[in-house]
Image (cartoon, rainbow, N blue to C red):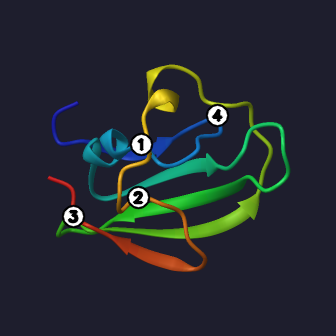
Amino acid sequence: MKGGFDVIIVTCAAQYAPPDLFKQLKPGGRMLIPIGQPFKRGQLLYVYTKDEDGKVRSRKDVGVFFIPMTGAMMNRPKQGGTSESSGEKTLPSVE
């Protein structure tokens, strides 16, 4: 989609937020994604917001329980700068 999406909602639990999804968010957009181990307690819904400069902020919202993400993304190691944290975090800008 040219210009990106206003909202991306991921409906399966990931180990981390895939960097390629941030590239698909338009400035001012939000992504909701459950992050955590599949079939275990501790999954959290993260809300990522991309500002007008392309910087991404994250915050933990609520505990959730989703099925696991599958496919090639789950076989890739986590890349720096997209990990979950407590509270709010600023991520590098995404071009």
Question: 8 above or below 68?
Answer: below
Question: 51 above or below 73?
Answer: below
Q: Which residue bears the numbered disc 3?
A: 93
Q: CA distance from mark 4 to mark 1?
A: 12 Å
Q: Is residue 69 left or right of residue 39?
A: left
Whichever of callouts 3 and 1 sits on the residue coming sooner in the sequence is 1
- The amino acid on which the numbered mark 1 sits, given as a three-letter code, is Pro
Q: Residues within 10 Å of mark 3 (few under 14, many from 20)?
A: some
Q: Which residue bears the numbered disc 2?
A: 82
Whichever of callouts 3 and 2 sits on the residue coming sooner in the sequence is 2
Rendered residue at 62%/68% (across/down): 60
Residue 76, given in percent of the width and then of the height, sits at 43, 33
Whichever of callouts 4 and 3 sits on the residue coming sooner in the sequence is 4
Q: Which numbered tag is attached to residue 18? A: 1
- The amino acid on which the numbered mark 3 sits, given as a three-letter code, is Ser
* SS at badge 1: loop
Q: Are marks 3 and 1 in contact (CB under 8 Å)?
A: no
Q: Which residue bears the numbered disc 4?
A: 12
Q: Are marks 2 and 1 in contact (CB under 8 Å)?
A: yes
Q: Nearer the viewer, mark 3 or mark 2?
A: 2
Residue 90, given in percent of the width and then of the height, sits at 37, 75
* SS at badge 2: loop
